[in-house]
Image (cartoon, rainbow, N blue to C red):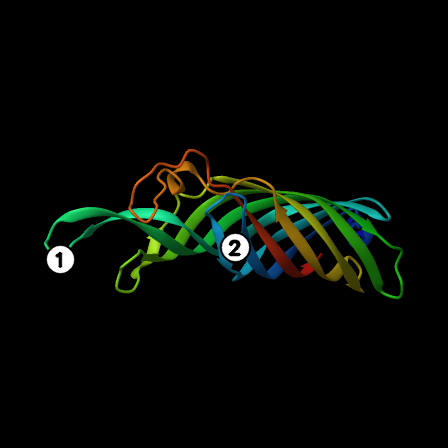
Amino acid sequence: MKKLYALGLLFIAFNLVQAQDKSFQLGFQLSPNISWISPDSEGLENEGNKLGFSYGIIADFNIAENYSISTGFTLLNSGGKINYPDKIDIISQAGATISQGGRTTADLRLKYIQIPFTIKLKTNEIGYMKYFGQFGVGTAFNIDAVAEEEFTYPGGNGAIKNDDVDYKDEISLFRASLLMGIGAEYNVSGNTSIMFGINFDNGFLNILSEDIYAEDANGNGEGNRDESFKAINNSIILNFGILF
């Protein structure tokens, strides 16, 4: 009986120590965002922003009182609207198939699995609050790309529209970005904290694959592009999470 009692006290003591150990915290994060695509090629134009929503698991390794290495696993919804020269086959009034040059506006919805690696620099606790700055990189892999398309051409009667067009071939598999942000953590109790902040996710690799610029098109539907279309994807992200 005494051994059982001692074992019970040891178990309680172990759990109390664990509760005070803040060397590692795991939690969940919800992140509404606004994103856009910034062109870096002649003929490619930005046509608007995209509202998105991301969520995932976050993990903080507290290597010192005021320093943490933060990582996780996030399903990132991003995108934007772009306009670029294009060429499609259409059927003329005479019934012949002709290659027609014009421009396509694509409203892109992109999904990535992102794994961030950042360093958090934290203040000492002020009341129940700690403030932090965050800096690092994001590595992401595209898992889905869909667009609403509108193709227009000189002399055309309105736009040719296509919904839910698969754009996975036009989007590069890998995306990398620079992550910068600020935020705060409010200690609720023990090892549990509520976290909120704002991040700038600045892409630095081309998100477009060769299939989107394989052919250039002028008003006559002639010509070949001799350089790659290049564009990066950026986001401003609001983060709300809880750490245990």
Q: CA distance from mark 2 to mark 1?
A: 40 Å
Q: Residue at x 48, y 52 (%)?
A: 45
Mark 2: secondary structure: strand
Foreground residue among 240 and 104: 104
Residue most toward the left? Answer: 94
User: Which amino acid lies under the numbered mark 2 shown in the image of this protein?
Assistant: Ser
Look at mark 1 in the image and give the residue it sits on: 93
User: Which amino acid lies under the numbered mark 1 shown in the image of this protein?
Assistant: Gln
Q: Report the mark closest to the observer, 2 or 1.
A: 1
Look at mark 2 in the image and give the residue it sits on: 78
Foreground residue among 92 and 13: 92
**Which labelled disc corresponds to residue 135?**
none
Horizontal and vertical percent position of residue 49: 53, 61
Q: Residue at x 44, y 39 (%)?
A: 209
Q: Residue at x 70, y 59 (%)?
A: 198
- Location of the C terminus by quadrant is bottom right
Is residue 210 shown above or below 183? above
Q: Is residue 102 left or right of residue 82?
A: left
Q: Are marks 2 and 1 in contact (CB under 8 Å)?
A: no
Horizontal and vertical percent position of residue 39: 53, 48
Mark 1: secondary structure: loop
Q: Is residue 51 left or right of residue 117?
A: left
Q: Is residue 87 in sight in this rendering? A: yes
